[in-house]
Amino acid sequence: MLVLEHNDKIGEKILISGGGRCNFTNLNAGPDNFLSKNLHFSKSPLARFSSSDFITLVEKHNIAYHEKKLGQLFCNGSSQQIVDMLLRECDNAHVSIRPGCEVKDVRKGNRFELFTSPDNLECESLVVATGGLSIPQLGATNFAFSLARQFGLGITGLRPGLVPLTFKPEDLRFFGALAGISVDANVTCRKVPFRESILFTHRGLSGPGILQASSYWEAGEKISVDLLPDEDAPKLLVAHHQTTKELATVLDQHLPRRFVLEWCERLGGSKPMQRYARKDLEEIARGLHNWEIFPSGTEGFGKAEVTVGGVDTDELSSKTMEARKVAGLYFIGECVDVTGWLGGFNFQWAWSSGWVAGQYA
């Protein structure tokens, strides 16, 4: 078996993941943690090679790991440990890897013929594991999608996922002043909630909660943010209604001070609580629990961790990952229309779909 790697270095996306410690899987990985036109497609691969199976492999190679939060597993050491583990597994299976090899063209007669930068190759089975469009600075290309179209396979709409969101200039006057501030929140897009922090940037919003919602968001849609997910905002404000405490003083017990001051400024400034009418406090409470934001766009594939969309799952067998129309042609990982949440889910999809294809290719 031969693996063709067009980058000179092997596993670059693995190496940068998880802040260099590789969030290699998630204890809770299941079909509900993925986006796809066909939400059932991932069930079979994820069940046949689960997060437990990958953890067993990690433990077999004596790689120490820990759970950070929400089932996310990271190496205690570095991401290089996962790359080294995979390379050892390749050696054990007599798999050769050829880095710096560009595939220029693929044709099919009785067998596949690959025209590559050093020479031409033939094979009976061809597995496409080239990823999506995210992080082109690491070598991401549209190779998988071009090849799929060449063989008559459908591609669903492609867009950046797990990506920071940007805003119009008038909104950036608010966001820009808060750059660097993180707020624990509940972020909802298309009725899918994520309890994660959000981070204000000079260009808009980022942080885990926003990255999660971004995979669901499409242009023109709103995102709802609950800034006080653990509090009853109406009850909190009414409890201080007859006091001389400033609104900002009440809120900065639960939110960062700099955020509170900017938030109050948008409301016309902070006043003593007793000067607010009851209906004003109810309106402020609604805004805190349901802050509606309308992004103007995203920071694009250059900052996206994944590509949403890909080779249409209707074109593939979930049992084998083989193209229904083209015998011997397989697509796995990010280039398929199966996109995971933040937190190790996309790596698990890569392991699962790759294992399934490996049983048949």
Image: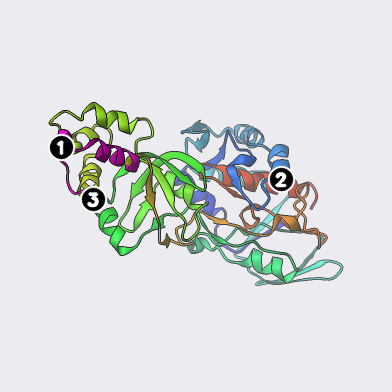
In this orientation, which residue lies closer to the viewer: 190 or 271? 271
SS category of the residue bearing label 3: helix
The residue type indicated by label 2 comes to Trp
43 sits left or right of 260 in the view: right
Q: Which mark is residue 275?
A: 1
Query: How many numbered dots are placed on residues in this image?
Result: 3
> Would residue 84 be seen by someone viewing this image from the given angle?
no
Q: Which is in the foreground here, disc 2 or disc 1?
A: 1
Dot 3 and dot 2 residues touching (CB under 8 Å): no
**What residue is drawn where x is 49% and y is 31%?**
66
Disc with the residue nearer the chain's start (3 vs 1): 3
Disc with the residue nearer the chain's start (2 vs 1): 1
Which residue sits furthest top? Answer: 239
> Would residue 18 be seen by someone viewing this image from the given angle?
yes
Specify start and end residues of the magenta stretch as a single range: 268-287
In this orientation, which residue lies closer to the viewer: 94 or 147? 147
Q: Which residue is mark 3?
A: 266
Q: Is residue 161 above or below residue 238?
A: below
Q: Which is in the foreground here, disc 3 or disc 2?
A: 3
Does the stretch in magenta take in 254?
no
163 sits left or right of 338 in the view: left
Where residue 77 sits in the image (x, y, percent)?
A: 47, 38
SS category of the residue bearing label 2: helix
The residue type indicated by label 1 comes to Arg
Alpha carbon distance from label 3 to label 2 = 53 Å
Q: Which residue is mark 2?
A: 355
